[in-house]
Amino acid sequence: MISFFRHSFLTLLVTTVVVCIFLVSGSTNVLAQSSSLNSGIATMHVIIGSSPKSGDIVSFDRRSQTFHLARIPGDKDAFGIVIKDPVLLLSSGNTGTPIITNGEVSVNVTTKNGPISIGDYISTSSITGKGAKAVNSDPYIIGTAISSFSGSASGTVSNTNEIYTGTVQMLFLHRVNPLASVDQKIPRSVEIGKNIIFHIMKYVLATLVAIGTVYIAFKVSNSSMRAGLISIGRNPLAKTSINSMLAINAIMIILISAVGLTASLALVFLPI
């Protein structure tokens, strides 16, 4: 009897995981593309204001909880890069624009702070949606260039007042500018430390929510399922009704676990 219960438990656990994955994928479309110079996971967000182009830099306004094209040099709220063909896209609907927040990505830049070489830090600039070579006065950077752009004819998209615009490949990593002075770094290092702690707590909370809901689901249904299995052995005539009760308990376990896993995913992808 114990081995039968253990087998049933494992079967329900596997079924729960499979069904939860199906439920999540039903509400979140996952699109994969194999041929792309970009790597990383992109998510869909509605961008307010100007029409974004692939490679434009997007910032997140914490007060209005909206996304817009970056327009402040060294923006601490830079969120990600608009991308046309992400390797992996998580979408909860048909509206919005794909934005990548990690990995290698093509980013639109200018020569406002000079030509960009491989290894240069990239930051946001006063030119809407465009990046530039980071300078000491930029408090934050968005990544490191892994290709160069000098404004030559082969890579120039436009030329306005001797400021050229083009694209470079970049490893996205929003962080404090290593070129900033020590006086600038000290207060911002405290802030970035708080952000790191907050994100760690967010992931820990999401994990606890997922594990906790699955545990509670099985804990609540455990006694009734065990009693049902024992009752089948004692009263075979009631097997049909007992099986119905066990099926209802299994469905409750699946639903509760699905809610918990969905909530944990929402915590992970919450743009805060």
Image (cartoon, rainbow, N blue to C red):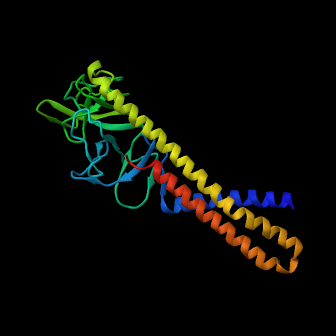
Residue 164 visible in the snapshot: yes
Q: In the rendered picture of this protein, how many numbered marks are placed on residues? A: 0
Q: Is residue 143 visible?
A: no
Query: Taking 197 as reference, is 254 left or right?
Result: right
Q: Point out residue 100 in the picture as x, y percentages from the top left corner.
A: 39, 44
Q: Residue at x 49, y 45 (%)?
A: 34
Answer above or below: position of 228 versus 241.
Answer: above
Residue at the image point whose x is 75% and y is 59% from the top: 9
Taking the view exactly as shown, the residue that stands out farthest to the left is 161
x and y percent of residue 265 in the render? Answer: 50, 52
Residue 69 falls in which quadrant of the image? top left
Where 195 sits versus 209, above or below?
A: above
Tell whether 133 sits left or right of 252. left
Depth check, front residue: 249 or 71: 249
| Most foreground residue, 216 or 260 | 216
Give the side of residue 248 with respect to residue 29, left or right: right
Q: Quadrant of residue 118?
A: top left
Identified at 62% across, 62% down, the residue is: 19
